[in-house]
Amino acid sequence: MALLPTALHPFKPRLGQTLAGYDRKHFLADLGAGVTVGIVALPLAMAFAIASGVKPEAGLFTAIIAGFLISALGGSNVQIGGPAGAFIVIVYGIVERYGLANLLIATSLAGVLLFLMGWLKLGALVRYIPVSIVIGFTNGIAVLIGLSQIKDLLGLQIAKMPADFFTQLSVLGAHIHSLNPWALLLGLGCLAVVVIWPKSYAAPDGASGWRHKTRQVAAQVPGTVIALVGATLLAKAFGLQVETIGSKFGGIPQALPAFALPEFTWATAKQLVIPTLTIALLGAIESLLCARVADNMADIPRHDPNQELMAQGVANFVTPFFGGIPATGTIARTVTNVRAGGRTPIAGIVHAATLLIIVLVAAPLAVYVPLAALAGILLFVAWNMGEWREFARLKHFLLPYRVVLVGTFVLTVVFDLTVAVEMGLIAACGFFIYRMSTLFRVSPVSNSELPSGVTVFELYGSLFFGAVGKIEALPGQLPEGCRVVVLEMNRLVSMDTSGLDALEQLWHALAKRDVALVLASVNEQPLGLIRRSGFEAKLGADHIVPSVGDWAPANEASH
């Protein structure tokens, strides 16, 4: 029990470390970055919430509360937390199947699980998920996000969109006659603005004049905000008949919600095991992938994955009590933070404060925001989320990589993320086991210095459960008159209990034929397992020798 505390990760937020030597220069940089990210996060938070099947304020509350907690308690200098596009499909499915109240419970339970993962130092395990699975489900989620926005982009009169992929296609096709051309024009206009709006501006040498200054200023304003404000003004000025936040949701409250406990029972919690695991797994993957991307963008200390998971856990546990949805690290906002000059968690805290001020001051204006405008913005988000070039590069990779990536992608789209990741991991493990088993070899060795009747086989690689068949086949490969089988194990790097059992079965099979078994040049790991299991005593210590040449003919005669 005394060793237990040393096995747990201490709760040490990165904020405390970065405040040492913090000065006015750092604060001004973080202030500018935080305000910029807060403005960028405003339309995305509302769009993610609406696409997830909840009210827009749920996204804003999540961005404010979870964004503050993740920055204040996290293990990264620059990561920005909040509602993420990757959660849209998951949250929508949970709301459809279990209801909003159960989504809040599942999110809080996922928060507990995330905190425990960090506390138990399991943050590094996320890195063991193959990149083919990550790309597959990321592209699949991007497709589903794009499909979910077709209704609002076209202004179709559909009361409730289903969660199933093929059913969505059927419903969209059945209601295509209700297309609203004004909604389509607004949505495509917003998409065009976000695509062509300058993301940054590097002036050529000697550049000057009003055009240069105008482009510099424009590059500092997020294209999503320009698109949202422009579409809202056009719809209001010309009285366009399009669905808005006000017409669908009645607007956004001009205050944060009160603390409220969702009704919780163990019977309900048992039904939410899969949703809880899905939220926790996706949150962990997204946040740590995002933190790794940020580490490579700026000259900052690398993130602490375990502390980051603990912060994600706290945020996801607390936010549902204020009507929030699942939160994680967000790549788009984190990248914006880094590029805007943010270098400490203060920038993330300022981002949350900026959103809070906007909600308290400008919430009534949100009623005029067209849903088609948010749909156009989300289509851009979905396109940027997907790594579409990976499909073109598949021809450069082997069949296992192709099968896992494409299989995960298809299962994500057709079924759901949980099934996709589960089957992807099973397929990846299956291919890995097969590949490792092919690396293990048993090769006959000719040695003229040994007496007749001695057959030597050299073992290569790792003797594990996927490769034991090659050991089991050895008795059938022995020549006539064989009295001793020597296994040269100098190149056997590891062995598991299944491999050990295969050696014992080989020993029994050879004993029935009055053939002795000798193990030569056994490495430390296999030798330790052989001794701990008691097989050394059964085999005889004199049958484990330093090298093949140390097996004396006298030993053969004695056996």
Image: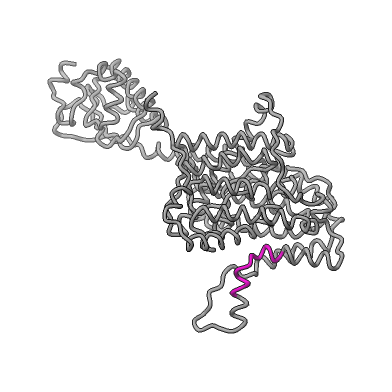
Is 321 above or below relative to 376? above
User: Of 348 and 334, which appears nearest the observer?
Assistant: 348
Quadrant (top left/top right/bottom left/bottom right) for the N terminus = top left
Q: How many numbered marks have been drawn onto this rendered protein structure?
A: 0
User: Is residue 324 something one can see in this rendering?
Assistant: yes
State left or right for residue 511 relative to residue 9.
Answer: left
Q: Residue furthest front?
A: 24
Q: Percent from the top left, x then y, of residue 87?
A: 64, 46
Is 89 above or below relative to 190? above
State left or right for residue 401 relative to residue 199.
Answer: left
On whether residue 217 falls in the magenta region, the answer is: yes
User: Of 506 and 240, which appears nearest the observer?
Assistant: 240
> Residue at coordinates 24% horizontally, 32% vertically from top-left?
488
On whether residue 72 falls in the magenta region, the answer is: no
- Please give the range of residues in magenta: 216-227
> Residue at coordinates 83% horizontally, 56% vertically from top-left?
243
Which of the 4 image quarters holds residue 238? bottom right
Which of the 4 image quarters holds residue 32? bottom right
User: Of 194 and 407, which appears nearest the observer?
Assistant: 194
**Taken as a whole, is the magenta stretch helix, strand or loop?**
helix
Is 170 above or below relative to 450? below
Quadrant (top left/top right/bottom left/bottom right) for the C terminus = top left
